[in-house]
Amino acid sequence: MLENMLSNLNDNQFVRNYKRMWPLAKPFWPAALLALLICIPVGALDAVIALFLKPYTDVVIVGKNMESPWYIPLLIVGFTTVQGLLNFASAYLNAWTGGKLTMSLKSKLADKLVELEPAFFDKSTSGEVLFRFNSDAELSCSGLLGNLKSFLTRICSSIALIGVLFYNSWQLSIMAIVILAVAVAPLTRVKKLLKKLVQKNNIYVSQLNSMYTETFSGNRTIAAYNLKNSQKTRFDSLLAHVFQLSVAMTRRTAWITPFMHFVISIGLGLAIALGSWLIVSGRITSGNFVSFLTALLMLYTPLKNITNVAVSVQNSFLAIDRVFDILDRPVAITDKSVCAAMPQELESIAFDHVHFGYTGGSEVLHDITMTIRPREMLALVGNSGGGKSTLASLLPRFYDVTGGCIKINGTDIRDFRLQELRQNIAYVFQDNFLFEGTIRDNILLGDPKASASDVENAVRSAFLSEFIAGLEHGLDTYIGERGVLLSGGQKQRIAIARAFLKNAPIVILDEATSALDNKSEAIVQQAIDNLMKDKTVIVIAHRLSTIRNAHRIAVINEGRLVEIGPHDALMQKPAGQYRTLYETQFKTRSMDV
Ligand SMILES: Nc1ncnc2c1ncn2[C@@H]1O[C@H](COP(=O)(O)OP(=O)(O)OP(=O)(O)O)[C@@H](O)[C@H]1O
Ligand SMILES: [Mg+2]
């Protein structure tokens, strides 16, 4: 019956999931094994009390003899004490191994999380990430170990109690076991009943997580657009879904326990009837019957608990499936097995018939061919959504080209080690991310080993000195999560200082489109000029001053490179796209200021 239950519980999933988790548990397998071995005596000792009731009943209650069984109460207390101590050891070892396992799984997941390519994050929500990398990991490990522990304890306890049953009367035992088998049969259906609901529930919980992070990050937009009510409605509707699901889950599973109770009460009735006959006919003693009944009643608890365990085991298994979905997922952008060495001196960056489309979308960049010379400053201009940021993001391989290739000194960038390639590029984004911490922490990200004077230098070059001097804690000022305590221009200059410290030969700068006032713009511009000195620069230009400084300008319209050349040459084309763009966009913008 037990074997049946085990296999019914989850076909091959049981073995498969433990196999998958095994490499994680391997480093501390002795502790894990000990934790599990302790379950055997903890479970089996349950039977001792039932077993001792036989001599006690026969000798004391029926035989009225006080002499021999004096030790029984002592033994019961003794065994219970031993069981208690073992229970403690088991709980401790379980918490320890469970904690270790969770830690290593989460750390493995975190490795994966930082390794995954931007396309993964494009497709996921923050709620999903939280759920799958955090909650699922917890559910997988603690659920799995804890469940295995209770499972083993219950099974050992059941086996020992069944032993007591047979010791007392095989006829009664066979009957009892048939009835118990009927009672626990519905457990095998739990998995199917739950799977869909659990999956749905997880989707809602992920959405809820996302709602929380969205409300957090978007709080100003919510306030500005009076979205409080609609946001609240979305919350409420999700919460209602979660509630309905949990009710549905209970409805589908809660009948199992009462059903088991019912079947078992029939069993008890039959046992009493058959037992009485067996006693009267002299086949068993009264002690046998009392001991049998006690064991049968005690057997009910572990068997019933196996139901709950079966449900949690299912949940753990579903979580493990999801976790390994992520862990087994190949990382799209990685190193080749043999990598070319990154050249010391940059000679050229060549886009060679580059095509690119985001996964699931249509092509964004079409057949772009151009070569950037060392220490050249190339400005990318063009219509919004035309593909400038996309083009720039291909160089550090945030995404890989879908056609053609990008070469540095004639070598495909996919042949370089990713880390080395990115080490050679300093990227200042349109919207720069600052991490929670101080200004210094954020600048040091450019080069964690930089000396204090290097940092000072970067601060000066990014025109931050004056701003920092005015702060009470200077460079050690805490800037809040995502740098919320700073202005747009300040954030950008911190990002520039960071890029400065990195001192990479290639600089990619996606200029912020948000209008800065005249003075800040001039300051940011000077900071940018400093950053670009002696570097090969691709700048996505939104400012007249930037394109004026550029050696050449590439116009990207609707994903195509339509013109490339120096400002003067492009301006001479009578109906040139750059000329039109310059006259409508840059010139007027500069007049606005
Ligand atoms: N992560 C993404 N996933 C899918 N599509 C994207 C993604 N990022 C951008 N796109 C799409 O690719 C196209 C080019 O976008 P891109 O950001 O490169 O334009 P851009 O030229 O930088 O525009 P802007 O001047 O407004 O910054 C757009 O149609 C955009 O919708
Ligand atoms: Mg852009």
Image (tube, rainbow, N blue to C red):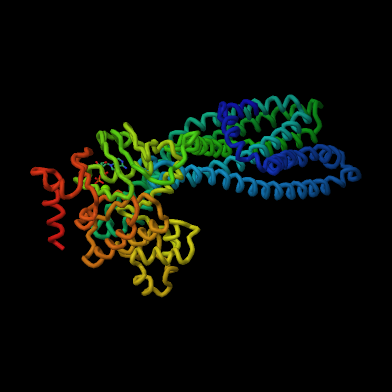
Residue 142, quarter of the rendered image: top right
Taking 97 as reference, is 255 left or right? left
Q: Quadrant of the N terminus?
A: top right
Q: Is residue 232 above or below residue 453?
A: above
Q: Quadrant of the C terminus?
A: bottom left
Instruction: Name the foreground residue: 461 vs 12.
Output: 461
> Residue, x 75% and y 25% (percent of image)?
170
> Can see residue 395?
yes
> Can see residue 252?
no
Where residue 203 appears, as percent x and y from the top left, is: 40, 41
> Residue, x 36% and y 58% (percent of image)?
495
Instruction: Name the foreground residue: 41 vs 452.
Output: 452
Residue 4, quarter of the rendered image: top right
Taking 385 as reference, is 78 left or right? right
> Residue, x 16% and y 54% (percent of image)?
586
Count of numbered circles on the image: 0
User: Outermost residue, left direction?
Assistant: 574
Taking 17 as reference, is 587 left or right? left
Where residue 56 appears, as percent x and y from the top left, is: 83, 41
Where residue 525 appears, as percent x and y from the top left, is: 27, 61
> Residue, x 13% and y 61% (percent of image)?
592
User: Outermost residue, right direction?
Assistant: 67
Residue 46, quarter of the rendered image: top right
Question: Ligand 1 shows up in which quadrant of the image?
Answer: top left
Where residue 513 appears, as percent x and y from the top left, is: 24, 55
